């Protein structure tokens, strides 16, 4: 395999004529490639590789109410980096009854836009549709996602991920997979 193609397989940065510096805005094409890779890793239950996509100061947030403060209001998920690692460890043990057998997942990431560049992070929004297939049937999880992407040691990483589900204000079935 050529060095130019290796980044597609292992997620390493693509060779470039000019290496982007930390804090430089992440171009749309690179942001899209990152979001597609994140979706593929989550769908395939490649948990270690998915976890490696996060920065050390990351937050993962799925609100019930998008306008509420997650520090004072109940959320579906509001994890810091340590809690993300704990969630991954729990899923890896095989003792998470809610994921035995594992959900079969297929995500579609669309409408990707670079919105802003703030404090060294590139703010990217997209729409995600996740089909979860389980013994109980199939469930569609659809929402608008905002990522804060940051270049760390030459690779794009997630500093924050916020998923606002279309149905977040309704009773939801158990969600014990990585959204």
Image: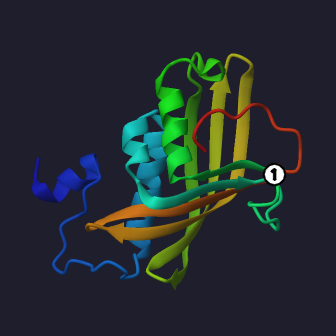
Q: Position of residue 155 (x, y in %)?
A: 30, 64
Is 74 or 107 nearer to us in this picture? 74
Q: Quadrant of residue 115?
A: bottom right
Quadrant of the drawing holding the C terminus: top right
How many numbered tags mark residues here? 1
Which of the two residues, 26 or 161, is positioned nearer the viewer here? 161
Residue 177 screen position, x and y as percent: 60, 35
Q: Is residue 90 left or right of residue 67?
A: left
> Residue drawn at (51%, 52%), measured in percent from left and top?
81
Q: Report x, y in % for residue 28.
A: 44, 73
Find numbered disc 1 in the image and state the secondary structure of the residue it sits on.
loop
| Identity of the residue drawn at 27% across and 80% down | 21
Q: Dot 1, how many residues are within 10 Å of its Cα: few (below 14), some (14-19), or many (20+)? A: some
Q: Mark 1 — residue?
A: 74
On screen, 123 above or below 65?
below
Q: Residue at x 32, y 77 (%)?
A: 22
* Quarter occupied by residue 127: bottom right
The residue drawn where x is 48% and y is 62% is 57
Q: Is the residue 25 above or below the residue 67 in the image?
A: below
Determine the residue located farthest toward the right in the rendered image.
170
């Amino acid at each position: 395999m050529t060095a130019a193609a290796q980044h597609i397989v292992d997620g390493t940065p693509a060779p470039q004529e000019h290496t982007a510096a930390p804090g430089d805005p992440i171009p749309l094409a690179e942001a899209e490639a990152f979001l597609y890779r994140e979706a593929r890793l989550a769908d395939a239950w490649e948990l270690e590789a998915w976890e490696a996509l996060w920065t050390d100061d990351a937050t993962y947030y799925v609100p019930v109410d998008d306008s509420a403060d997650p520090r004072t209001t109940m959320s579906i998920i509001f994890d810091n980096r340590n809690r993300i690692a704990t969630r991954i460890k729990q899923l890896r043990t095989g003792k998470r009854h809610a994921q035995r057998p594992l959900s079969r997942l297929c995500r579609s990431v669309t409408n990707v836009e670079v919105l802003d560049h703030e404090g060294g992070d590139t703010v990217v929004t997209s729409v995600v549709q996740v089909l979860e297939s389980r013994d109980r049937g199939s469930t569609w999880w659809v929402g608008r996602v905002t990522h804060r992407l940051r270049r760390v040691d030459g690779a794009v990483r997630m500093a924050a991920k916020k998923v606002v589900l279309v149905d977040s204000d309704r009773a939801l079935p158990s969600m014990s997979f990585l959204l």
